[in-house]
Amino acid sequence: MKSYLDCIPCFVRQSLQAARFVTDDAAVHEQVLRRVLRTVAEMELNDPPPAMAVHVQRLIRKLTGNDDPYRQVKDEFNRHAMEMVEELRPSVKKSSDPLETAVRLAIAGNIIDFGPASQIKRSDVDVVIRRALSASLPDGAVEQLRRAVDRAGRILYLADNAGEIAFDRLLIENLPREKITVAVKGSPIINDALLSDAEAVGLCDLVEVIDNGSDAPGTMLQTCSEDFCRRFRSADLIIAKGQANYETLSDVEVDAEIFFLLLVKCHVIAQDAGWKVGDLVVARKGLGARG
Amino acid sequence: MKSYLDCIPCFVRQSLQAARFVTDDAAVHEQVLRRVLRTVAEMELNDPPPAMAVHVQRLIRKLTGNDDPYRQVKDEFNRHAMEMVEELRPSVKKSSDPLETAVRLAIAGNIIDFGPASQIKRSDVDVVIRRALSASLPDGAVEQLRRAVDRAGRILYLADNAGEIAFDRLLIENLPREKITVAVKGSPIINDALLSDAEAVGLCDLVEVIDNGSDAPGTMLQTCSEDFCRRFRSADLIIAKGQANYETLSDVEVDAEIFFLLLVKCHVIAQDAGWKVGDLVVARKGLGARG
């Protein structure tokens, strides 16, 4: 997905929020904001929105000297989410369709995203979970996913955020683990999950977890390691979590089927894809896609 | 009032909205946005927010070749507001305190502001009017205004927007007209009232109306005519409508008492002045101010 003019005011707002989130130093807030304005003024709109997030977050890390400014909220939401998942696991098991319930919860977990929002409370996650359990899903989408999982040999699961990754674990518990590799980010970007977050929620004991070598949100292949790109190209099925994975992969040609699982949090992506803000998305993409 | 870092994302958003409001040409939208980003990156935060609006609106006028892009909505809201005022006049007359009711309505009319909002419907104005008739006003503020009007020899009434100016007329009908001069803008800026708008709502038949020689929102004295500045300096009482007049005059030293009458539409101004968004403001400023 390309960037839109509407993304630009949002980048500017987000960079001020992000700067404030990671430091109380008003001089740094101003420096970040002025530098971002100059960069955005020259920005190539053909790049997906995460390209700008990479720039902003690198700038903040450089100006604050803090390499992982979201570390604290990542730890906090890993803990919260693990508690929630422990409570929710019995209801997934009891559900008439455990896979569908786990898909709903994995999408609900996508609310834990410090990109579009500067503050997220545990109670916000509770509200989204309750809604997700009864909200409508695209007709037949879970069936399509179930069949794609059945016929795939190698499944690559692209994780999104810390905290959210505990809900991904719950979904993966309901998938054939032996087929699955989970990919996390190579280095800190906003509150995206790293290897340590996969470990914190016990995912590494369950499936193979690799990092993609990148510090970009989503999956910007040109910033990923060769190793990751090989795995990406050889997967039969890619399950891609979150908005940034849609933004960076919706226009990429791949042989695999891709299922995007995400919660729509932004009007621009909603308009681009024909969704509504608040929608639970299970969207299939792929040349060889079959129902 | 100085500008805040929070004003910057808002300027960027507003300039895109304003560009879209005045033309459908996406190339112009992008040109405006990129130029505004470059300018805002270097902006002096000690200037009040309207300094940026001047720049943006000049740019839009230049790039579109349209000298008064808000002319149509100004005409439309002059007509709507005149109809509303005709309906409301009897209730002002019947009111136990006609001045207070007219003050409430003049503040409600301040909703017709295409600066912070890109779309305003007639029904939005109806809602604000209903609310304004019963909303709380600062304790004793109307009494202070009444006494200031009584003791003043020369009252300068700084109008804000087209449409709104019909509600100003209703207030002025309840003030000693012989003391009053109304000032409008010298040339087009957003939907601010010009001489033609004062004429359209019949204000010129009621009181003296002058223009301030400026194309800035509010009253940036350095952009106003000498003639206007003389009138400004020689007034005993200044009634200043709208946010932009507060933003440009709150830090200016004057001998006159100033009463700011406005509807709070922005979080930044609310925080600066200790108000809340949605508040009806009657705020007095002035070294020699007495109760």
Image: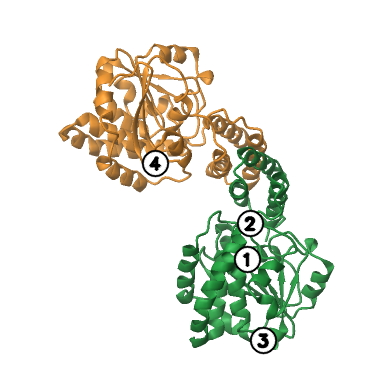
Chain colours: A green, B orange
Between circles 1 and 4, the one closer to the viewer is 1
Q: Residues within 10 Å of mark 3 (few under 14, many from 20)?
A: few
Q: Position of residue B26 (x, y in %)?
A: 62, 47
Relative placement, left or right, of A82 versus A237 is left
Identify the image quadrant of the C terminus of chain A.
Answer: bottom right
Above or below B150: residue B275: below
Relative placement, left or right, of B162 versus A137 is left
Alpha-carbon span between mark 1 and mark 2:
10 Å
Q: Residue at x 46, y 35 (%)?
A: B272
Q: Is the residue under label 2 in contact with that under label 1 (CB below 8 Å)?
A: yes
Q: Which mark is residue B276?
A: 4
On the question of residue A272 being in view, the answer is: no
Between circles 2 and 4, the one closer to the viewer is 2
Q: Which residue is mark 1?
A: A162
Between circles 2 and 3, the one closer to the viewer is 2
Identify residue type, mark 2: Tyr
Look at the numbered disc 2 and give the secondary structure of its residue: loop
Residue extending farthest right: A226
Q: Position of residue B226 (x, y in %)?
A: 49, 12
Question: Closer to the camera, B162 or A98?
Answer: A98
Alpha-carbon span between mark 2 and mark 3:
32 Å
Chain for disc number 3: A
Q: Which mark is residue A176?
A: 3
Above or below A255: residue B124: above
